[in-house]
Image (spheres, helix red, strand yellow):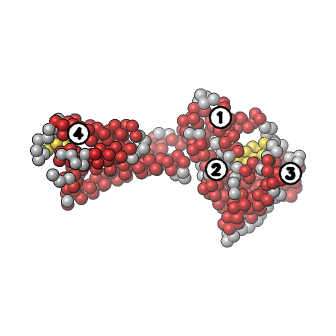
Amino acid sequence: MNAIRNFAYKPGDHEAEKASNSYLMSLIAVMAGLPLPIINLVATLIFYLGNRKGTYFVRWHCTQALFSQLSLVLMNSFAFWWSVSILFGPESLNNSYIAYIFTVFVFNVSEFIGTIISAIYTRRGMHVEWWFFGNLTNLICKA
Amino acid sequence: MKKVAWQAIVLVVIFFGTWFVLSKVNWMNIFKIEQLTDNLEEKLGNLFWDIFNKTDEELNTPDITNALDSLLTKICISNNIDKSKVKLHVLKKDEINAFTLPDRHLVIFSKLIAEAENEAELCGVICHELAHMELDHVMKKLVKEIGLSVLVSMTTGSGGSDAAAEAARLLSSTAYDRTMEREADIKAIDYMIQADIKPEPFADFLYKLADDKSGIERHLSWVNTHPDTRERAEYIVEYCRDKIKHNEPILSDKSWNSLKESLNY
């Protein structure tokens, strides 16, 4: 899922730290914001906006972190509102709901692990590109 | 661009594929969810019923139990409701009230039966409460107002008797939300039509309670706990306007009169 690739230039230590923080930001926000699915996106978005004028390496990783969080927000929001409608609304617990929660859990854990790996490697100045999100970021984030 | 689009499609397919495959597993059985829910409801039902049973006298005379059992049996059979699971209780109390507790306890206060002018009015209230049961409104209301963790702690004995009493009070003296009440009313009408009971008297009963509110307001818990009584009566009339209705009395005049007389009002 994650591949280490060559970047356009070798990032400095300060850049590596900032880029790594973009992933850490989403991890901390996930832990602090559960079960609300929007918190991690908001945290990553704030970090992204704060680094819009940063170096290419920092911007690239902030964008990748933002995209990865965006997909999670969609899945988690649906899970959140489905849970609310089961607890307080007309829906009742069923196999589809439990299967959906498991699916979302698997995707969240994969994302969580991927984010930790990215944070570690990026801190060392390595360029980590995620499957799909890396290519999407390449399309949008230009030097 | 093409590569990204393909990867996006693959990602979506993986997500929905995983969901589809996992939804084929019978998780409800694996986690014994229905059994756990039933156990929780049974414990809560017994806990709350004990609270009412300790404070108010239950009326068990044959005239009352036989008459109400006949009404309940007819409604349940006509609507494929498992009557053996419904626990019907009549409490001697000067309040016009009826409510449902978890585990299908249906509690009716004697004053409500006394105020009903005919069996259809009483059947309307019974059908309304049965609808709350069938639509699982009771547990939803408890979870919403009290919280699942508090409910579970009550059943393990660590929640405290005050919390249980408060929850019982909540069920007997506060309303469900407007959507739930409407759902229960509409379902009650369907039950009545299915059981060959005319639904209009149910609306009449609500009109009567709404009109008479000033005089006996303090006794009208069922009105106070079911707001907008007049509005409810109006949409009940509207809903059953075009329905084909038959009216077959369930109780004989003698049984109905015996029921009323045995309440001593």
Whether residue B123 can be seen here: yes
What amino acid is at disc 1? Answer: Ala
Residue at image mark 3? B260
Quote the CA–CA distance across marks 3 and 2: 29 Å
**Mark 4 against mark 2, which lies toward the viewer?**
4
Question: Is the residue marked by circle 2 packed among few (<14), some (14-19), or many (20+) residues within 10 Å?
Answer: many
Mark identifier at residue B164: 1
Q: What residue is shown at x 63% (from left), y 37% (from top)? A: B44
**Mark 3 against mark 4, which lies toward the viewer?**
4
Residue at image mark 4? A18
Quote the CA–CA distance across marks 4 and 2: 52 Å
Question: Is the residue marked by circle 4 packed among few (<14), some (14-19), or many (20+) residues within 10 Å?
Answer: many
Residue A25 left/right relative to B76: left
Q: Tell which of A130 and B66 is nearer to you.
A: A130
Quote the CA–CA distance across marks 4 and 1: 53 Å
Q: In this view, does B229 lie above or below A99?
A: below
Q: What residue is shown at x 80% (from left), y 38% (from top)? A: B57
